[in-house]
Amino acid sequence: MKINKPDYIFETSWEVCNKVGGIHTVVSTKAITLKENFNDKLIMIGPDLWRDGISNPEFEEDNTIYPDWLKVAKKAGLKIKIGRWKIVGKPVVILVDFTPFIAEKNDIFRIFWENYQLDSLSGQWDYIEPAIFGYAAAKIVESFTKFKVGQKEQVIAHFHEWMTGSGILYLKNNMPQVATVFTTHATAIGRSIAGNNLALYKNLELYDGDIKAKEFNIISKQSLEKISAREADCFTTVSDITAKECKQFHEKEVDIVTPNGFEDNFVPNKNDFTEKRNIARDVGLLKSKMRKRAK
């Protein structure tokens, strides 16, 4: 089977240069392989969340990367920073301040309702902010593609989790020539069921995703995740068991399962393990002595 290699890959996640969970590890540790294959045509997009003059410790700004497009994007009102993620491989990263789009959220969600019946009505800030970030990320892909990408060049935009699914919906309506990939690492419904100490996989076939969404008050998250899975050109998840969740809760089978993999450099070598173990033991002994003296 012939595999077409894209000319550009955009990869969007709330956890690009923003370590809040396990997806940060997944995205960052595979970046070196993608970078080797695509060089600076791999472009990762994350949220610009650092304020009050404090710089993001994972990000190194570099305005010499795509400087011609950068000027155009900023002139168009996109509040972005371009640079590199300070991990192995140092991939290109665009951090976007999505907050200016929050003022437009009613119109944005209205259009998504009209086009896709996306139910955002009950979404609170933990829904609104990431959904608007996904929208802003798609605007970046749109701007870059229009300005920089040739007619015969192919672009893939990869979005992780429901939190960025709005980007898929925007691109499908405004830039259908950009192929979209949606990956869910764990479904919102599955997390809620497990988080409420209910048997998830034992009773999986008994659960209706939309009914459970009402029960757990996550209607908007379920709606965005389910519609993103349906509308993306390629729908993936990271395990066979999560693929079963997706089929049950989203009524759509995944196109491919892509198990998480980590580069060798993610795991410390034997000598590093020994050193870290000795340090941890010494610190533990010191704390134990201090507790005894305190008594």
Image: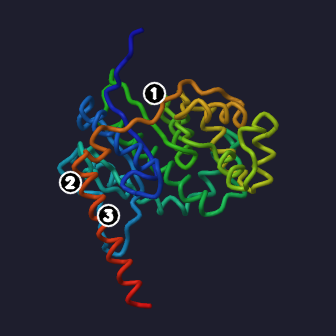
**Where residue 133 sits in the image (x, y, percent)?**
49, 53
Kindly check if marks 3 and 1 are in contact, taking CB atoms under 8 A apart as contact: no
**Where residue 86 sits in the image (x, y, percent)?**
25, 53
Q: Amino acid at mark 1?
A: Gln
Label 1 belongs to which residue? 177
Q: How many residues crowd around disc 3 within 10 Å: few (fewer than 14), some, or many (20 or more)?
A: some
Tell me the mark number nearer the camera, choosing from 2 and 1: 2
Q: How many residues crowd around disc 1 within 10 Å: few (fewer than 14), some, or many (20 or more)?
A: some
Marker disc for residue 62: 2
The CA distance from mark 2 to mark 1 is 29 Å
Element class at badge 3: loop
Element class at badge 2: loop
The CA distance from mark 3 to mark 1 is 33 Å
Q: Earlier in the sequence, mark 2 or mark 3?
A: 3
Q: Nearer the viewer, residue 51 or 265?
A: 265
The CA distance from mark 2 to mark 3 is 13 Å
Q: Quadrant of the C terminus?
A: bottom left
Marker disc for residue 122: none
Query: Is 180 located above or below residue 269 in the figure?
Result: above
Q: Earlier in the sequence, mark 3 or mark 1?
A: 3
Label 3 belongs to which residue? 56
